[in-house]
Amino acid sequence: MSNPYRQIFAAPGAKGFSVAGFFARLPIAMAPIGIVAMLSQAHGEYWLAGAVSATYALTNAVISPQISRAVDRLGQTAVVVPTTIVSVLAFIALISAANQNWPVWTLFASAFLAAAMPSIPALMRARWTELFRNQPELTTAFAFESAADELVYIAGASLSVGLSVALFPEAGMMVSTAFLALGTAAFIVQRGTEPKVRHVAGAASVGSAIRQRPVQIITLALIFVGAIFATAEVSVVAITKELGQPNAASLVISVYALGSFLLGLTLGALNLRIPLHRQLLIAVATLAVTSLPLLVAGSSVTLLAVAVFVSGIAISPTFITAFGLIERRVPESVLTEGVTWVMTGIGMALGAFVSGWVVDTYGPQSGFWVSAAAGAATVLIIALGQRTLSGECTDGEDCAMLEPAQ
């Protein structure tokens, strides 16, 4: 049996943009938790750290799809270069504000501007789609991207927290900013795999990708998935500190996505017969159920690590099926924007703020109740959206559900 991953990397330029893109997207994992680690140490308040991190994530959730919409119209290079420069300069300002104890408003202002960071995962998936559009290799490529996202999460989050705890509070954010600048530069200079700008007839009538019902459903669901992620990060940092082992936070966070990474690679080599919308429902239901052990896992670092490992096994299957559905349900002319809306759904703004407040108010262990509630909400959203996500259009009602929202 041939190796499907070897096949996709045989495409010209695939290895190059994949390596560059890996480093360019590390800040996706490093920045949110890096802000929390930096400010919680520098200012000693989790609510402030969570609020600034949420400002960055929520603003990025709003701005990033607009950046990707411009990418669909103008091309990756024309848009990514200036937005990355703005984001890098803003991150430098945020680090300086934390280190020099500038007024609190400068933290929020810097985080707001740093949100101009483009969605590298969306740009990556757009390049894979350009290479393998309407081919079975695209499913494998998306599976690889989801597994790579998990590896980024494993490496990025743990590296960010580890540097901040072991060296100095700003260390994680400094390295994250360097990866953003250098990785994006290496990615964007590879023009051979950059998707061509397609001016599809009737594209103007499509409007924004967020007007498409499948994008709305999946994005809303992944906002709550993002809340699960953010809650895990904030709660783990708080619990390990309470247990007197703050250095263990990076290790516990790293195992969060380990199981999902391995499962994602396995799924990418399989050709499952279950429809994608059903696969997504199974994945989010598993994610919700496996979040429940976290509620009683705060008595030791070992127990916490095991519970966190189990809670992460369904992450990659959720991503693989979500992006597969977007590729099939969204018009080609707004594909990058559609993928970005889904990615920003994982922006973790909701969880970072709510879990930070819950931890400060009720204690570290209480933060995981946010995960449980978010998991239930995710299942409900995907379950109610099954008919739309299936792509069925057998009567007037179903057809209307698949039309752009008015």
Image: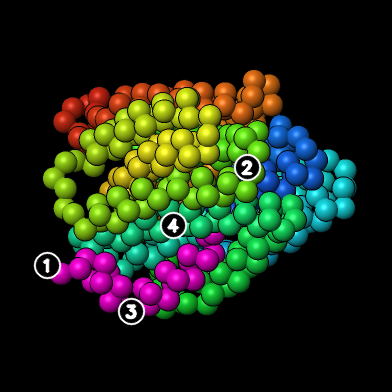
**Residue drawn 16% across and 41% down?**
274
Is the C-beta separation of discs 2 and 1 under 8 Å? no
Q: Is label 2 or label 1 in front?
A: 2
Q: Earlier in the sequence, mark 3 or mark 2?
A: 3
Is the C-beta separation of discs 4 and 2 under 8 Å? no
Quadrant assignment, res 195:
bottom left
Quadrant assignment, res 144:
bottom left
Q: Earlier in the sequence, mark 4 or mark 3?
A: 3
Reading the image, the residue beneath label 4 is 151
**Residue drawn 51% across and 45% down?**
252
Q: Is residue 284 visible?
A: yes
Q: Which mark is residue 1?
A: 1
Reading the image, the residue beneath label 3 is 12
> Type of residue at label 3?
Pro
Q: CA distance from mark 4 to mark 2?
A: 24 Å
Q: Bin the neighbour count of mark 3 within 10 Å (Cα to Cα): few under 14, some 14-19, many 20 and up.
A: few
Q: Bin the neighbour count of mark 1 within 10 Å (Cα to Cα): few under 14, some 14-19, many 20 and up.
A: few
Q: Answer with left or right where residue 396 lies relative to residue 84.
A: left
Q: Is label 1 or label 3 in front?
A: 1
Q: CA distance from mark 1 to mark 3?
A: 23 Å
Q: Is label 3 or label 2 in front?
A: 2
> Type of residue at label 1?
Met
Q: Is residue 96 magenta?
A: no
Pick the quarter of the image with the N terminus: bottom left
> Type of residue at label 4?
Leu
Q: Is label 4 or label 3 in front?
A: 4
**Under tag 4, what secondary structure?**
helix
Q: Earlier in the sequence, mark 2 or mark 1?
A: 1
Reading the image, the residue beneath label 2 is 245
Q: Which residues are magenta?
A: 1-27
